Amino acid sequence: MEPLLDICGLDARYGRAQILRGISLSVRRGEVLALMGRNGAGKSTTMKAVMGLVPPSGGTIRFDGRRIDGREAFEIARLGIGYVPEDRRVFSELTVMENLSVGQRPPRQGAPHWTPERLFALFPNLAAMRDRPGGAMSGGEQQMLTIARTLMGNPRLLLLDEPSEGLAPVIVQAMARTILALKGEGLSILLSEQNLHFAGSVADRAAIIEKGEIRFDGTMAALKADAALRAQYLSV
């Protein structure tokens, strides 16, 4: 079966600095792929290139068989890709309900259909603060709100950039349960992550990126079994 997201030979630059060098990876329908690596390895740039926020300088990106490299970010989002950036970006003066309404889009064929009530069942903490401004929430609550707002667009593929970064362990556990629930809904997820324990609890496969190149692409079980590989590319 053709992958939902297929990246082939992707190059990307910031000015004269080349960040991605021939990246190739794919996300299959209904799976979670963890893109792992140290800070500065190219994880976030890969996601931004998929979303059209960083223009690729080479290679191709296909979503559901259709080339999306070179398209504007809003066009890519309309095709069914949701993006949750590392810095969250909630609307601080809008309430939880108002933040959700900003992301609302019509139902999409082949994607779960999300409503505020369904999302409150998925994120019980948000249900108790429907009228709270985004700026009056904790970091973990803001992370949940950002994911919920993105889901209101009914994406088929979700890009999550470092969702566990800086969160308390209890919130990280809740985040893992959420990702597994989304996978159970049939959503495909590309997860950027440094936390091996967190990634290992939710991902089917892993790809390791180092200095803008893919160094490993295989099952999460294979990564967990290879201590030398983890020490080489994931240890701090």
Image (cartoon, rainbow, N blue to C red):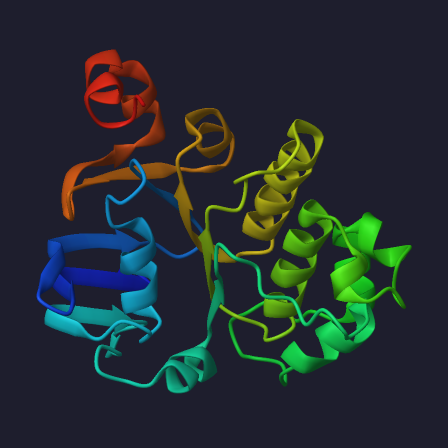
**On the picture, is 132 further left or further right than 165?**
right
* Residue 50 on image: x %, y %: 30, 67
The vertical placement of 63 against 120, above or below, is below
Task: Tell which of 235 and 104 is nearer to you.
Answer: 235
**On the picture, is 216 further left or further right than 175?**
left
Q: Residue at x 16, y 48 (%)?
A: 212
Q: Residue at x 44, y 28 (%)?
A: 200
Residue 169 location, quadrant: top right
Q: Residue at x 20, y 61 (%)?
A: 7
Task: Tell which of 207 and 137 is nearer to you.
Answer: 137
The vertical placement of 36 against 150, above or below, is above
Q: How many marks?
A: 0
**On the picture, is 98 further left or further right than 142?**
right
* Residue 235 on image: x %, y %: 30, 21
The quarter of the image holding the N terminus is: bottom left
Residue 131 location, quadrant: bottom right
Task: Tell which of 183 and 167 is nearer to you.
Answer: 167
The quarter of the image holding the C terminus is: top left
* Residue 90 on image: x %, y %: 65, 66
* Residue 96 on image: x %, y %: 79, 67
The vertical placement of 91 against 158, above or below, is below
**On the picture, is 173 further left or further right than 205?**
right
